[in-house]
Each structure stands twice: as structure tokens, then as C-alpha cells.
């Protein structure tokens, strides 16, 4: 998540399912508008802004409103040059697949350039990072383990075959300069994984032990949660 949230505005804008949020340049005085932003199926959203973004301080502001309870994401309001992803302000992480974007400008004073931002889905849901790592791994033992876990859990299989995960594979391949296999993982007989033979079973066990254990039994529940 940290790596994805630190990418540049232009790089973020080119990500699959990225949504551009933008005001007129310059924006009019004495105006207001709302926009519902939603990326279906996203575990969470990241928001960052173009470096040109600027509004009049205090009077002209942008607010990220929660879809569920009407509260706000991040600061109570963003104005002047204080926007997510600019200067010392971190990118805004929204733990939902939607939010209401609200802008308001005063009828007094001047105006500025306005805002231009990008919203994109975070592709490693909270609590699923270990599973995402396994899905992206090029390790043969990891692939065999993934196949077994998908047979045991419809939830894991559903996430592995989702559009979000497929997009993540593409982005991961581009960033790591590795070939991308855009075939969707599935539980069907036409699996992209090879069952191999019994000679590989020790490799799989070794990988599973090293991946899920740090030397004690405290992490055994993680493996159970995955297979459940």
C-alpha cells in the first residue's frame, strides 16, 4: 500500500480504473458542487493531486465526505496548497469504495487555479496482503499452494479471479519489468497452474512453512484463515 500510494500523479492517472476529479480552471466564485466517486469492488481508494492544484485559503475548499455516516475522510477540509499528495501532505487513503466530493467557493475575494486529482483503487485489501503476495509470486511452490487454497476457499478464489486482482498483476508486472500473465486464476479444470508430481511436494511444504511461520505456532491461525 505504501508503494502504491507514493507514486506520482501522472503514473496514478494511468492506472487501471483510475478516476479523474477536476474543477474548472479557474473555478468560478460563489459556487458549489458535489460528485459521488465510486470504484466498484475496491477494497479502499487512494487520492492524490496535481501540483498545480490551488484554491483560495479557507474560503474555497474541498471536502471528502463519507458515504456511510456523512463524516469526513482526512482533514475537515482541504484548501490553498494543502491537498493530499502535495508538499508534506500524504496521499489520502479512503477505506471504502466510494465517497462524496464536495467543493465550495466564496462569493467574496479572488479565485485560483482549482483542483485536479486522481482516485484509484487500492489492490491489496486489508487482511488480504499475504494472499495477494502469494498470487503475485513467481515461485512454483507458491503457485501450487495458491491452487490448493483456491480449491478450499471460494472467497480466495473469487478475489484471485477478480478484475481488481487482474489489474494489480498488470501494474505489478509493469513496475517490476516482469512478464504479465493476464489470464484469470480460476477453480476450473483449465487452471494456469501445473499440478506437477510428488517430487515437488517437499518444496511446497518448505515454502508453506517458511511463508506462514516465524518459528512458533502463533501464526498458524493465519494459514487457517486463508484456507477457511
Image (spheres, rainbow, N blue to C red):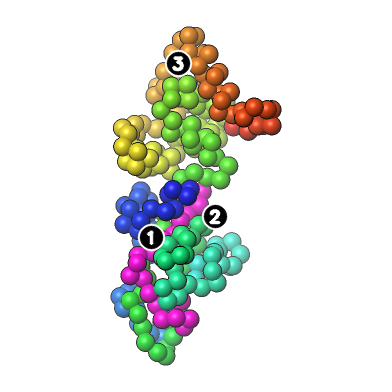
Residue tagged by mark 2? 95
Counting residues from the N terminus, which is met first, the one under dot 3 or under dot 2? 2
In this rendering, does residue 148 appear at all? no
Q: Which residue is drawn at 59% across and 32% down?
A: 226
Tell me, for residue 7, which label it has, or none. Answer: none
Q: Which residue is drawn at 54% across and 65% down?
A: 74
In the displayed structure, 69 sits above or below 184; it is below
Which residue lies most toward the bottom here?
Answer: 108
Q: Is mark 3 on a helix, strand or loop?
A: loop
Circle 1 residues within 10 Å: few <14, some 14–19, many ≥20: many
Q: Is mark 1 on a helix, strand or loop?
A: strand
Relative to 212, is 142 on the left or the right? Answer: left
Tell me, for residue 118, which label it has, or none. Answer: 1
Tell me, for residue 195, which label it has, or none. Answer: 3
Query: Separation of disc 1 and disc 3 at Cα?
Result: 42 Å
Q: Is residue 51 magenta?
A: yes
Residue 190 or 149: which is nearer the viewer?
A: 149
Magenta highlight range: 35-62
Amino acid at each position: 500500500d505504501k508503494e502504491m500510494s507514493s507514486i506520482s500523479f501522472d503514473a496514478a492517472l494511468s492506472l487501471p480504473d483510475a478516476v479523474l476529479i477536476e474543477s474548472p480552471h479557474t473555478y468560478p466564485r460563489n459556487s458549489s458542487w458535489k460528485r459521488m466517486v465510486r470504484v466498484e469492488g475496491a477494497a479502499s481508494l487512494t487520492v492524490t493531486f496535481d501540483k498545480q492544484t490551488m484554491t483560495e485559503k479557507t474560503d474555497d475548499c474541498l471536502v471528502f465526505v463519507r458515504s456511510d455516516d456523512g463524516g469526513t475522510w482526512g482533514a475537515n477540509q482541504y484548501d490553498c496548497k494543502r491537498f493530499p499528495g502535495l508538499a508534506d501532505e500524504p496521499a489520502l487513503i479512503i477505506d471504502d469504495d466510494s465517497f462524496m466530493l464536495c467543493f465550495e467557493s466564496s462569493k467574496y475575494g479572488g479565485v485560483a487555479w482549482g483542483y485536479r486529482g486522481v482516485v484509484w483503487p487500492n489492490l491489496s485489501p486489508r487482511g488480504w496482503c499475504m494472499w495477494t503476495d502469494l498470487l503475485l509470486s513467481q515461485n512454483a511452490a507458491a503457485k501450487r499452494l495458491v491452487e490448493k487454497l483456491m480449491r478450499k476457499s471460494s472467497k480466495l478464489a473469487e478475489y484471485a479471479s477478480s478484475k481488481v486482482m487482474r489489474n494489480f498483476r498488470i501494474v505489478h508486472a509493469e513496475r517490476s519489468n516482469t512478464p504479465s500473465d493476464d489470464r484469470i486464476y480460476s477453480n476450473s479444470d483449465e487452471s494456469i497452474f501445473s499440478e506437477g508430481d510428488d517430487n515437488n511436494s517437499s518444496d511446497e511444504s518448505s515454502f508453506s512453512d517458511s511463508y506462514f511461520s516465524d518459528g512458533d505456532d502463533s501464526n498458524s491461525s493465519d494459514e487457517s484463515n486463508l484456507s477457511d
